[in-house]
């Protein structure tokens, strides 16, 4: 049995992590609307709004690498974690930023502790997602820079429509996620494949 024993605290942490991510997966359509609110809130600093627009584009972009796999439901796990990391890192201590947090306690209350729990289970996968935050305002979506979606009404409407389609077609609910997600490794294995696919797409060999 050597090597198979897991401390009780680790089992408890893993169970809490699975429950947490299940809830985040179910609430993703709602949380995406919060990101749209951040993008549209002119009281927020411009960099915050750019990060919000970037994470929206990241979430609604098709993820072809898992579209035909049985774990398509869990493939949204990196999206739900990144959305929270991005908004938490982007929002500073200003009055308007604090006011925005207070409008959405369902997302921000206890978020620091929840992300710390994620890091304890996910390890370097969390570092991978955290590294994406600074690049979110620089990505392109459908051939347009993210800033275009803030400054151009037509582009912004396109992103809004894509968000609406995403929320309408989103395949996750309480029943599907309970059936598909029972172990932390189910989440981390899918994330590692996504990380490796991304690295290959960039022509960079994924770290073993």
Image (cartoon, grey):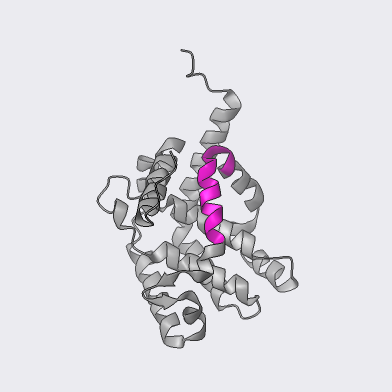
Range of the magenta residues? 119-133
Q: Vertical placement of 181 versus 105: above or below?
A: above
As drawn, is 131 to the left or to the right of 187? right
Residue 61 position by quadrant? bottom left
Can residue 183 be seen by looking at this rendering?
no
The residue nearer to you, when weighing 185 against 143, is: 143
From the viewer's perspective, is residue 14 above or below residue 169? above
Spot occupied by residue 139 in the image (x, y as percentages of width and height): 46, 69
Q: Residue furthest bottom?
A: 153
Residue 61 visible in the picture: yes
Main SS type for the magenta part? Answer: helix
Residue 8 placement (x, y as % from top left): 58, 24
Q: Residue at x 65, y 75 (%)?
A: 45
Apparent side of residue 24 relative to residue 203 in the rendered image (left or right): right
Is 101 displayed left or right of 123 in the figure? Answer: right
Between residues 158 and 181, which one lies in front from this camera angle? 158
Residue 190 part of the magenta segment: no
- 34 above or below 125? below
Residue 152's spot in the image, x, y percent?
47, 86
Q: Is residue 17 left or right of residue 181?
A: right
Q: Residue at x 60, y 77 (%)?
A: 41
- Quadrant in which the C terminus is drawn: top left
Residue 127 is one of the magenta-drawn residues: yes
Residue placed most toward the observer, 130 or 173: 130
Number of numbered discs on residues:
0
Which residue is depicted at the point 51% across and 50% down?
Answer: 128
């Amino acid at each position: 049995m050597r090597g198979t024993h897991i401390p009780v605290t680790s089992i408890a942490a893993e169970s809490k992590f699975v429950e947490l991510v299940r809830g985040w997966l179910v609430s993703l359509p709602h949380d995406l609307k919060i990101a749209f609110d951040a993008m549209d809130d002119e009281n927020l600093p411009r960099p915050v709004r750019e990060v919000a627009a970037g994470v929206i584009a990241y979430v609604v972009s098709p993820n072809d690498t898992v579209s035909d796999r049985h774990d398509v439901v869990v493939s949204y796990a990196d999206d739900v974690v990144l959305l929270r990391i991005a908004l938490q890192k982007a929002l500073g201590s200003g009055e308007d930023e604090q006011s925005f947090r207070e409008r959405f306690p369902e997302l921000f209350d206890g978020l620091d502790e929840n992300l710390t729990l994620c890091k304890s289970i996910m390890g370097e996968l969390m570092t991978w997602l955290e590294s994406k935050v600074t690049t979110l305002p620089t990505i392109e979506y459908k051939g347009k820079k993210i800033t275009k979606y803030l400054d151009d009404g037509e582009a912004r409407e396109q992103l809004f429509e894509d968000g609406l389609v995403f929320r309408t077609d989103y395949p996750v609910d309480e029943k599907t996620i309970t059936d598909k997600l029972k172990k932390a490794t189910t989440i981390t294995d899918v994330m590692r494949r996504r990380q490796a696919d991304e690295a290959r797409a960039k022509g960079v060999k994924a770290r073993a």
